[in-house]
Amino acid sequence: MNFEFSDDQKLLKEQARGFLASKCSAKEVRRILDGNEPYHPELWKGVAEMGWLGASIPEEYGGLGLGYLELCVIAEELGRAVAPIPFSSTVYLFAEAVLIAGTEEQKQKYLPKVSEGAIIGALALSEGAGAVTPKTIKTSVAGGRLTGVKLPVTDGDVADYAVVAARTGAGNDEGSISLFIVDMKAGGVTAEAVDTVDPTRSHAKVSFDGAGAEPLGAAGQGWAILDKVFDRAAVLYAFEQVGGSQAALEMARDYAMGRYAFGRPIASFQAIKHKLADMYVATELARSNSYYGAWALSTDAPELAIAAATARVSATEAYHECSKENIQVHGGMGFTWEFDCHLHYRRSKVLSLVLGSLPRWKDRLISRLEERNAA
């Protein structure tokens, strides 16, 4: 079993890194962090022109049909650059939900628009603080009209369409939840931007008041569809986290090599060596698990559920470790606004929650291992 990327995929990685280095410098990320724009429109346009939005979308739906390995390569570079664009919401969540559960008509309607960057997508699931379960979802649909409040919705204030989880059954079990596609610019939808720890990624409180709702997948199958979407997205987010971990490690290494104390580079001190070694090990462990997840995703292997949860857990821990220790290696300067360390720390916090918290993914991994071992 070979988990290595091919020469073509490595070339794509180099091209992606070069493009993002020229279009998404720390200065450009800070432009979004400090400004009022919810995302970087020029970068979004450039990414669409590069064809990245349609990398894994089949050619019959307007995509490039390259596959998931290529999308993983792109995701790692986006994470490395802390890209301030709604890429993950549109590609990992909205497009994947349509690919998994959409009718042929829905795929023909939405996926070409995603590929060309004509629309921004989102997933509206959470309804406040705490873990999301079928019982916590109060948003409901009656007579084709959606009513409820979702908070927070990543990119909810800029999305053109969103996949929304809503209650359609009487009980509190998974069978009571269905999915719907909602036009976010239509009547009955109000989006209000909310502040988060990472202003480079937009979040919103979205209220639905009798909004039109288009069914996505069979009634009562919403939770099962979300499980599949999350398994795929977990692998892709893991690559973003690995990219971020690697960037934070390199920032710490470069600073430690160039910063002198008592006539020596601080990188020569044992305490700094230990930190850098721990960051390296965490990143490589996450990378290995993410490669395994990429293989399972690209081959639709039965191990995908376990591989995805493993990648998610290790990548979340690695990005948190590296972004935190990068600040420590920088000493007092790492806490200042002027240094870029906090860009990765903020992004690591947001990515650690976007698909559910780390404890929930650890529980998910344990339950899936138990199910496999009991079979």
Image (cartoon, grey):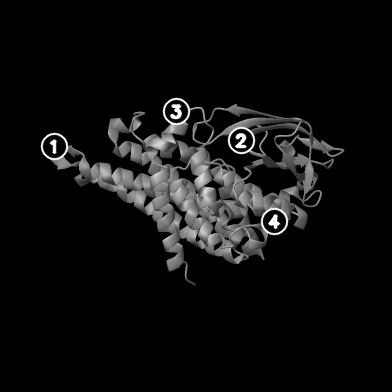
Q: Report which residue position mark 1 lands on.
A: 262
List the residue tagged with mark 2.
158
Q: Position of residue 136 (x, y in %)?
A: 71, 36
In front here: 108 or 334? 108
Q: Quick check: 211 above or below 304? A: above
Q: Is residue 129 visible?
A: no
Q: Earlier in the sequence, mark 2 or mark 4?
A: 4
Viewer-proximal residue among 246 and 117: 117
The residue carrying pointer 3 sits among few (fewer than 14), some (14 to 19) or many (20 or more) residues within 10 Å by Cα, namely: few
Which residue bears the numbered disc 3? 34
Q: Is residue 81 above or below residue 304?
A: above
Q: In the shown orientation, is residue 293 left or right of residue 282? A: right
Residue at image location 15% in from the left, 42% down from the top: 264
Checking the image for residue 100, the label placed there is 4
- Relative depth, front residue between 272 and 368: 272
Q: Quadrant of the C terminus?
A: bottom right
Q: Which residue: 47% across, 39% down?
A: 347
Query: Which badge, 4 or 1, comes first in the chain's sequence?
Result: 4
Foreground mark, 3 or 1, reads 3
Left or right: where 1 falls relative to 331: right
Name the amino acid type tagged 1.
Phe
